[in-house]
Amino acid sequence: MNPASIDAPQPAARNEPGLHPRTILVICLVPIAVMLFALFAFKPLYLMWCKASGTQMNPNNPTAAIQHSGRMVKVFFETTIYDGLPLRFWCDQASSDVEVGADGTNLYHFHN
């Protein structure tokens, strides 16, 4: 045994720059988990919340759109032009009373 080899300093552990493999795994799995939640779990949870809270907010409910309720809603049509543009923009009716569930029309005009 060589006494010089016993007292020789041991090489230090290498500390290379970079991310820990567990950190890389988390960075990759979190977006995948969010995407899977959005694709598969969000709609059932939203429907459960609507049923539990009693709001029944279903934007694609065709039965609500077809039924005439007898209620009238006043609809205002905006024709404002900003930035002083050299054009005209107007509609035939500035406002209209429409029954909820019924169709209504208004014609817009544009002149450049």
Image (cartoon, helix red, strand yellow):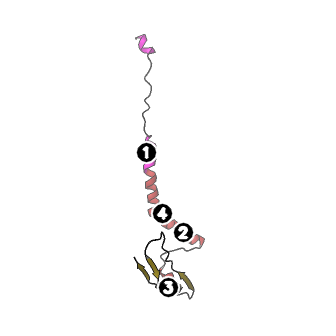
Look at mark 4 in the image and give the residue it sits on.
Answer: 41
Q: Amino acid at mark 1?
A: Ile
Q: Amino acid at mark 4?
A: Ala
Q: Amino acid at mark 3?
A: Gln
Measured as percent of width and height from the top left, residue 35 is found at 44, 58
Look at mark 3 in the image and give the residue it sits on.
Answer: 93
Q: Nearer the viewer, mark 2 or mark 1?
A: 1
Separation of disc 4 and disc 2 at Cα? Answer: 11 Å
On screen, residue 28 above or below 91:
above
SS class of the residue under badge 3?
Answer: loop
Measured as percent of width and height from the top left, residue 26 is found at 46, 48
SS class of the residue under badge 2?
Answer: helix
Q: Is residue 27 magenta?
A: yes
On screen, residue 17 above or below 52:
above
Q: Image point 43% across, 55% down: which residue? A: 32
Point out the image quarter for the C terminus. Answer: bottom left
Measured as percent of width and height from the top left, residue 47 is found at 52, 70
The numbered dot on residue 64 is none
Q: Is residue 24 left or right of residue 45?
A: left
Separation of disc 2 and disc 1 at Cα? Answer: 35 Å
Look at mark 2 in the image and give the residue it sits on.
Answer: 48
SS class of the residue under badge 4?
Answer: helix
User: Contact (CB < 8 A) between labels 3 and 4?
Assistant: no
Which residue, as the protein is rendered here, is positioned at the far right? 53
- Label 4 or label 2, whichever comes before in sequence order: 4
Separation of disc 3 and disc 4 at Cα? Answer: 45 Å
Separation of disc 3 and disc 2 at Cα? Answer: 42 Å
Question: Mark 1 packing: few (<14 Cα in 10 Å), some, or many (20+)?
Answer: few
Tell me where the magenta segment starts and ends, as one range. 1-28
Look at mark 1 in the image and give the residue it sits on.
Answer: 24
Q: Image point 47% across, 82% down: which residue? A: 91
